[in-house]
């Protein structure tokens, strides 16, 4: 009887279109199913782990279909609903499914044949129990220090090398720089417990009496009594004393204050036993308060009732609440309602900086049910969270059964099983948009699609909605709820504009600070209040300039000047990281007359330390927050009033809540207002309104000082009057007149190549084709503001597509043009990047 031959379509984490078909060996019949990982050969020598998309019996067209080499998982590592989101991301943002998989899966769930292997230095050489293939690999490795899996397969002449490697790792003969079969390794801790002979009251006390008869055993007795005291403390949690309870070895040693040798003696005597226990890397948190204790104001209660009412007819609701109006309390009430139904909640934030403050508030009410997910976690921590979201029933409430996930945009891509609510806080924020690598998705828009896949509701919250979201709400596509008053009768901050032209003429400037701003900072510090200073440039000085010939040191890889960083005493490029030592003379004319121009957060911090030597000053920007916990420390120190002045870039503008901030200073609003982008007016209003909203959030009145060379700019007038509807109407007229979103859709096509002439030639070839296909709707080609980044010259096309035309059809035409362009041999080295909704 002939057996049925099965084939499998596999998704690989590569920027290639489509799936790849492999043959399933009969030994894996019935085991290979959707969502599991399989190890497959790719090309002449590569090995990859891919995801099973479909199992079928359709014979592929290509000859000599390769076999899958290994089945990695016993059960799927992705969900079907998650895969539907991947498919939508691929279609809408015009990228390959492999690119979506590459950014969605944590690195620890991806295996490639680049894993390096070597002989274990502790291997005793005993190969008597090894298979012939294993012996061959071990002998081959004895001649090579470290080789990749690919190289080992060639050297040993073994095609199915992964199972062999896995077996050798388990036998201790081989070590790897990461686990072959699955890089993820559970974390274990050592626990101690009393052996069965002494795990009862009578036997334990008899042991203490026996050991106490000799002074030589004093340390052992101290250790056992300390162990007993820890068991007594656990009695309150368990309701009874349990002599068999294991305790962490580290905690036992610290509490007893004895050397590890004392434990070794008790282990040898059979008094204690030792075991490895699998533990979480994620920590444990208890809830400290009840959601019922949150008392909503009349306005908050009304807003919540309106949200619930609109959820009956609308999938998406926009909550437009002024800064400090108490949106988070409404979120907590809604979250509690959904969690009580046994469903999951996704809470998205634009910045990792925000998560540290919000997570503490949420854990206060929801304890271990709160999971946090963002790029600063290491890969093993991210896999633990991934597993808890995908298989929540595997974990008890005590272990952390994550029902509420809080995170930045990458949290959108977790394998949710049963979402009951999605909250997108600060929905207007540009950080929700990913720029590199593909998919270049907007997490807010993608969250709306995810809500539709799960047939659940999504709440967008902000004090300054994006024009697109507010337009959708006004058109009836979204529900709209307003909160116009701050919580607890606190008032919106008073905002003053300082004209830098007049202040400079009247000699009322010290450095980059007006005397008016300095006076308010002094007053705040005298009153033991706090100050936030916003400057949206990091570093010390923006450029170094030769006053003789006007030469500026430039990055050798990008078309930008180098920024001076005082702490490292280097000139750095903020695009590629290139750095050089500070020049003492001009490289062009050799003049010594070199001067620092412009200023960033580092220079502001330096000035404030000199001007206010008794004040504690902290800085929040990319340079000070590179480590995983740096955000949390800076923010918690400021929250606990251990620092008086917080200097920062855009990170300080986003939803942070501090009780005693009375003054906010904005040193140069013109950087935001004059940026060459069709959204610069809107984003300037949003940024200035948001940073102003950090002041006066509780009982202390807030004051905001905005410095500008153009105080008559309409955006500043709208900020001062806190008039979002006026700003919205002003911008809507311009957007309609010049055909920009929300009235049309934009697609940006960027050409990249190390040689400028190649980019120009490619642009010249594409221009007539695009203009013919999309008549009257193509802008460009043009070099962007920074025309070369990381040795790649750039040239942009902007394509405007009407909303009343089928978008998929227009994208299909664009894809066909790009595919044909890439198919020509002369264009293979030109990279084409498509950015939908830039």
Image (cartoon, rainbow, N blue to C red):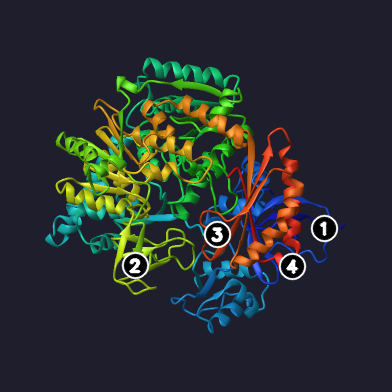
Q: Helix, strand, or loop for circle 3?
A: loop
Tell me what residue is drawn at x 56 percent, y 39 percent: 416
Q: Which of marks 4 and 1 is in front?
A: 4
Distance, label 1 to label 2, CA atoms, is: 71 Å
Q: Is residue 128 above or below residue 354?
A: below
Q: Do the residues labelled 3 and 2 touch (CB within 8 Å)?
A: no
Task: Please tell me which of labels 2 and 4 falls first in the chain.
Answer: 2
Q: List the residue tagged with mark 2.
A: 548
First-in-chain label (1 vs 2): 1
Q: Do tag 4 and tag 1 residues touch (Cβ < 8 Å)? A: no
Q: Mark 3 points at which residue?
A: 182
What is the quadrant of residue 668 in the picture? top left
Helix, strand or loop at label 2? It is loop
Q: Distance between the residues labelled 3 and 2?
A: 60 Å
Q: Which residue is drawn at 39% across and 30% down?
A: 717
Q: Which of marks 3 and 2 is in front?
A: 2
Quote the CA–CA distance across marks 3 and 4: 39 Å
Q: Can residue 244 be seen by looking at this rendering?
A: no
């Amino acid at each position: 009887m002939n057996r049925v031959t099965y084939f499998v379509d596999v998704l690989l984490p590569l920027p290639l279109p489509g799936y790849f078909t492999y043959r399933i060996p009969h030994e894996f019949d019935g085991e290979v199913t959707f969502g599991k990982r399989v190890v497959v050969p790719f090309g002449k020598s590569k090995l990859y782990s891919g995801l099973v998309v479909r199992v079928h019996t359709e014979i592929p067209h290509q000859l000599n279909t390769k076999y899958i080499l290994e089945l990695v998982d016993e059960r799927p590592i992705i969900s079907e609903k998650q895969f539907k989101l991947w498919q939508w991301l691929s279609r809408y943002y015009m990228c390959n499914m492999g690119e979506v998989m590459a950014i969605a899966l944590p690195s620890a769930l991806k295996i490639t044949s680049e894993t390096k292997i070597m002989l274990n230095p502790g291997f005793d050489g005993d190969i008597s129990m090894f298979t012939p293939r294993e012996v061959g690999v071990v002998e081959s490795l004895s001649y090579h220090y470290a080789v990749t899996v690919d190289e080992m397969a060639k050297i040993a002449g073994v095609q199915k090398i992964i199972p062999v490697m896995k077996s050798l790792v388990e036998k201790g003969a081989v070590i790897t720089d990461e686990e072959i079969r699955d890089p993820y390794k559970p974390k274990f801790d050592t626990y101690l417990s009393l052996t069965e002979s002494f795990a009862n009251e009578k036997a334990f006390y008899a042991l203490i009496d026996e050991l106490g008869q000799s002074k030589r055993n004093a340390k052992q007795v101290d250790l056992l009594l300390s162990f007993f005291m820890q068991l007594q403390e656990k009695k309150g949690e368990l309701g009874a004393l349990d002599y068999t309870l294991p305790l962490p070895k580290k905690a036992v040693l610290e509490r007893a204050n004895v050397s590890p040798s004392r434990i070794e003696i008790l282990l040898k005597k059979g008094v204690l036993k030792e075991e490895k226990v699998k533990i979480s890397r994620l920590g444990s948190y208890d809830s400290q308060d009840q959601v019922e204790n949150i008392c909503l104001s009349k306005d908050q209660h009304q807003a919540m009732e309106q949200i619930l009412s609109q959820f009956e007819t609308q999938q998406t609701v926009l909550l437009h609440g002024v800064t400090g109006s108490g949106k988070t309390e409404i979120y907590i009430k809604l979250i509690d309602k959904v969690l009580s139904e046994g469903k999951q909640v996704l809470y998205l934030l634009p910045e990792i900086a925000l998560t540290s403050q919000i997570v503490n508030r949420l854990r206060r009410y929801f304890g271990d049910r709160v999971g946090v997910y963002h790029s600063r976690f290491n890969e093993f921590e991210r896999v633990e969270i991934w597993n808890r979201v995908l298989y929540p029933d595997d974990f008890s409430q005590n272990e952390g059964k994550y029902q509420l996930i809080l995170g930045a945009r990458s949290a959108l891509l977790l394998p949710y099983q049963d979402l009951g609510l999605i909250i997108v806080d600060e929905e207007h924020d540009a950080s929700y948009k990913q720029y590199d690598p593909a998919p270049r998705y907007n997490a807010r828009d993608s969250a709306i699609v995810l809500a539709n896949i799960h047939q659940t509701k999504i709440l967008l919250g902000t004090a300054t909605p994006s024009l697109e979201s507010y337009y959708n709400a006004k058109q009836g596509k979204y529900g709209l709820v307003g909160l116009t008053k701050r919580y607890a009768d606190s008032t919106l901050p008073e905002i003053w504009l300082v004209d830098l032209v007049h202040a400079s003429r009247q000699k009322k400037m010290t450095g980059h600070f007006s005397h008016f701003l300095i006076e308010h900072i002094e007053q705040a510090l005298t009153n033991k209040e706090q100050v936030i200073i916003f400057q949206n440039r990091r570093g010390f000085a923006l450029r170094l300039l030769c006053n003789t010939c006007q030469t500026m040191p430039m990055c050798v890889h990008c078309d930008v000047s180098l920024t001076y960083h005082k702490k490292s005493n280097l000139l750095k490029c903020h695009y590629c990281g290139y750095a050089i030592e500070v020049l003492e003379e001009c490289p062009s004319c050799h003049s010594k007359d070199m001067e620092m121009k412009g200023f960033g957060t580092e220079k502001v911090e330096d000035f404030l330390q000199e001007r206010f030597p008794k004040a504690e000053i902290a800085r929040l920007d990319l340079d000070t927050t590179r480590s995983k916990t740096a955000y949390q420390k800076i923010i918690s120190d400021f929250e606990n009033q251990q620092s008086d002045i917080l200097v920062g870039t855009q990170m300080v503008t986003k939803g942070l809540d501090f009780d005693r901030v009375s003054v906010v200073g904005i040193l140069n609003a013109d950087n935001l207002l004059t940026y060459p982008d069709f959204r610069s007016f809107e984003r300037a209003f949003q940024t200035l309104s948001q940073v102003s909203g950090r002041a006066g959030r509780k009982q202390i009145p807030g004051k905001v000082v905005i410095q500008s060379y153009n105080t008559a700019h309409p955006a500043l007038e709208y900020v001062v009057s806190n008039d979002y509807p006026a700003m919205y109407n002003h911008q809507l007229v311009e957007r309609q007149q010049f055909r920009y979103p929300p009235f049309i859709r934009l697609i940006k096509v960027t050409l990249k190549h190390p040689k400028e002439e190649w980019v120009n030639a490619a642009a010249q070839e594409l221009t007539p084709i695009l203009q013919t296909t999309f008549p009257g709707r193509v802008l460009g080609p043009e070099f962007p503001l920074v025309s070369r980044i990381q040795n790649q010259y750039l040239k942009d096309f902007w394509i405007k597509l009407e909303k009343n035309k089928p978008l998929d059809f227009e994208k299909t035409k664009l894809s066909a043009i790009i595919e044909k362009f890439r198919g020509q041999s002369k264009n293979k080295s030109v990279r084409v990047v498509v950015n939908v909704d830039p």
